[in-house]
Image (cartoon, rainbow, N blue to C red):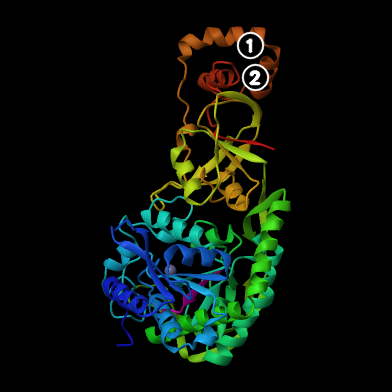
Amino acid sequence: MNSNYTPSYEEMVEFYQELADKNEDVLLLNMGDSDYGLPIYLCLLNVPNDSLKALESARTNTTLLINNAIHPGEPCGVNASMQVASSFANEMPPESKVNFPITAIITAYNVGGMKNRGSFSRANQNGPEEHGFRGNAQNLDLNRDFIKMDSKNMFTFATIFQALDPDIFVDTHTSNGADYQYTMTYIAPIKEKLAPSIKSIIYDDLIPHLHENMPKKWNYDLVTYVNLRGQTLDDGIVDYNATPRYSMGYADLFNCISFTTETHMLKPFDERVRSTYAFLLEVIGYAMNHQDKIEKARAEAFKFDQNSTSYPSNFQADTVPDSILFKGYEWKFIESMLTDEKRLKYYQDKPFEKYIPHYKNFHPTDTLTIPSYFIVQRQEVDVIECLKANGIDIELVKKDSLLKVKNNKILDYSTTSKPYEGHYLHSNIKVVHEETELKLKKGDVLVSTNQLKRNFITHVLSANFRDSYFAWNFFDSYLQQKEYFSPYVFEEIAVDLLKNDDALRKKYQAEFDTEDDTSRWEQLYFIYKNSPYYEPTHNVLPIYFVD
Ligand SMILES: [Zn+2]
């Protein structure tokens, strides 16, 4: 095959179908729809030749899930995974297959993007000659869709992920950004958010294993993802905190050991494919030899979750860097050929190796308390559907009743001024929890946190989390006040309220204590907001919890 070629969707499916037809222990499953209308296929290696038994076997044994072509312009993983499947089926002797982890390959996740094939959408990339496009059929970047679930693709992904319960997850990409010597870079989850056993297996075992074997066996030096802090490497690199909107951040919520591979865009395509293949084989190799350790680490992580009373969240990078020995290329700012501005130029003939600042430590800026259970009101059908799709056990309230709970009242937030992935994402969310008596109605949903997936539950349902359902606009209707007042009518009422309510009067006097320029409207609205006339549901989300 031409080394600068990546297959079309049809060619890829045909390849896997043929492999599955010829091999008892290779299975190709149609796992569900994509927005485009064509299915998302999952290829399973080293499984019984029966779909239910194969998935059951994946859940109970050590399983690696590989996701490809979420960005179809970055198809190294599509080619590399075909080679992994082919090596397994055609080259591996049966006795070596015994410890081979079950390897599940999402052959191409963004089917619509893959069908939108061309040669120009990756302006800065060195091949392949034709490739797919980043946006899916809905023009969504699917690698921001793991919580909000706007695409059918994501419902299919959740089906796959929950059916497999993978121990390790790798999402394959090609980078944008700076020029440097490395062909392969990778993102690991920031250590501060991980359960101790998962942190240990990633940082003490797997990363050292990869850093040792990638150069030694494959001749690829490895470095963490090059996420520049400023314009050049002199300002250092910051580790990438993939929150749950991203595939690996989603996997992290289930104590799955996650990585993203990012090959360098300017390296030839065949080298990018080979380094992705090497990375996948090294992860598989580690899993082959450490199945018990992996299973134990995951079991311990779920126990750790169960014993935790809160999660640190909304991490930010520390401002004091560590340092990292880095293999880059000399650069200079030279005259631009087009404008009066200076431009950055790298010199590939002048490689260097030097220490640069590395911002790898993070600290939480929020804490999410884990309640004993959440209540989601029945009208929130989209939220309930998302919870179910992610394998969350829920219980329906059987009859109307009263319950002492805490609410989620939004005090403040910011919102993007332009659409982001089909949403106006909220951030800087301030929420207060008031004790209240809730009228539970038949059909409301109780979500106990006494289940393995309490990490996911707590993150999506805690309003102040960066990627919560609130942040992703599921509850925007509750942010709008529905009733107001006419000042000419309300003024008499306001005067009466101040006369008869000492507490309100004091509050009012404290607020408007000087001869300042507050308007009559502001004063009346203050009295209104602190009176029984103001709707108690304004800014109160349809999510409650019991400690
Ligand atoms: Zn990408």
As helix, strand or loop, the secondary structure at mark 1 comes to: helix
Toward which corner of the image does residue 440 lie, by quadrant?
A: top right
Residue 326, horizontal then vertical, whole percent: 59, 83
Total marks placed:
2
Image location (x, y in percent) of residue 439: 57, 24
Q: Which residue is denoted by mark 1 in the rendering?
A: 498
Circle 2 — which element?
helix
Amino acid marked by disc 2: Tyr
Q: Position of residue 340 (x, y in %)?
A: 37, 73
Task: Name the kind of residue labelled 1 in the image.
Answer: Leu
Q: Give yes or no for residue 520 being in the magenta stretch.
A: no
Task: Answer above or below: position of 489 versus 179.
Answer: above
Q: Is residue 18 above or below residue 1?
A: above
Q: Quadrant of ligand 1?
A: bottom left
The reply to whether callout 2 and callout 1 are in contact (CB within 8 Å) is yes
Q: Which residues are magenta?
A: 258-266
Q: Which residue shows up at 54% across the image and 32% down it?
A: 539
Q: Residue at x 70, y 66 (%)?
A: 197
Residue tagged 2: 508
Is 262 magenta? The answer is: yes
Frontmost residue, 525 versus 127 = 127
